Image (cartoon, helix red, strand yellow):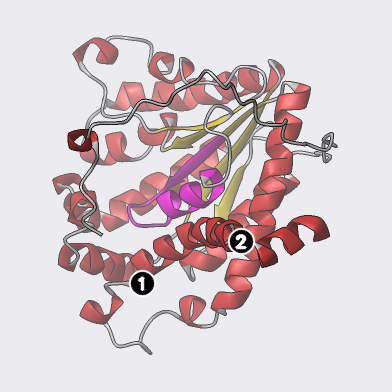
Amino acid sequence: MNERFARQIGSDPYLHDELMDSIDEELEMELDDDRMDALVESPGDGPAGERDMDRRLYFRELIRLQAELIKLQDWVVHKKLKLVVLFEGRDAAGKGGAIKRITQRLNPRVCRVAALPAPDEREKTQWYFQRYISHLPAGGEIVLFDRSWYNRAGVERVMGFCSDEEYQEFFRAVPEFEKMLVRSGTILVKYWFSVNDDEQNRRFQMRIHDPLKQWKLSPMDMESRRRWEQYTIAKEAMLERTHIPEAPWWVIPPGGKKRARLNCIHHLLSQVPYEEIRREPIELPPRVYNTNYIRHPVPDEMFVPSIY
């Protein structure tokens, strides 16, 4: 923020309110994260990774990193880069929270999220990767996959939604598929969010008791909890067989959602060498007034009631 704008904010209460509203967006999400903790634990019982993250430090670093993400976004547009980021991990591992913080201040026309539902009957007959290809970025775009083609190596394998032959074919095909993406100029970054047994249980309990988050729990989530060890075996096989030089896996360790978000964003920024794009100073043009313009009144019944 330059000094001139800072002085404007200090002297204009409306600009100050606009700035605080922007900051409140993040505060609202953080309060939502912490809102139901008291239902399942006392304030001192949470994991150390959550407790020892100073909130002021978290906000300061998050806003600083989000400013760098904007620079990265500008560089992607300027250089017509194609950036794909995969977010994988167990349920309640923190993927969604990290994605929200990455996209929060970016242009949705540049950076979008692909969160595909289960394949329909037609898609089940297609080449496995076909439904994902239409979501890949063009030049100057960023796509974040909230779960990806690695569903076959995880949930489909554990829940029996694919045959053993389809599972083995996936492992034969996915390294070649990703190598083709990279050769085509796509930057591919793959994250696995880890969560330990106790931490996942705690987060599931929070969702069970939180009416605003119960929609996040599905019968599949409950079954995944029961099959924890099978998911672990599937994850280990996936990381071992698809960790390739062209597209390596990066593991976000457990130990606190705030730290995980900051570490993920910091690492993502390091994966794309970028420079700040210098912008020309912007000056608002003078407002044009026409003496013959008459503003027509809006009927009272069209206004939304002022309840608050």
Q: Is residue 276 above or below residue 306?
A: above
Query: Residue 183 location, x and y as percent?
Result: 70, 18
Residue type at mark 1 is Asp
Asked if residue 211 shows in the view, the reply is yes
For label 1, the crowd category at 10 Å Cα-Cα, with few meaning under 14, some 14 to 19 and many 20 or more, is few
Q: Which mark is residue 126?
A: none
Q: CA distance from mark 2 to mark 1?
A: 17 Å
Query: Residue 232 location, x and y as percent?
Result: 37, 53
Residue identified by numbered label 1 = 34
Q: Residue at x 30, y 56 (%)?
A: 229
Q: Residue at x 23, y 42 (%)?
A: 304
Query: Which of these two is toward me, 177 or 53?
Result: 53
Residue type at mark 2 is Leu
Give the magenta-colored segment's residue range: 85-103
Q: Does the magenta segment cover residue 37? A: no
Tell whether 196 sits left or right of 68.
Answer: left
Q: Which mark is residue 62?
A: 2
Residue 203 position by quadrant: bottom left
Mark 2 and mark 1 lie on one chain; the one further toward the N terminus is 1
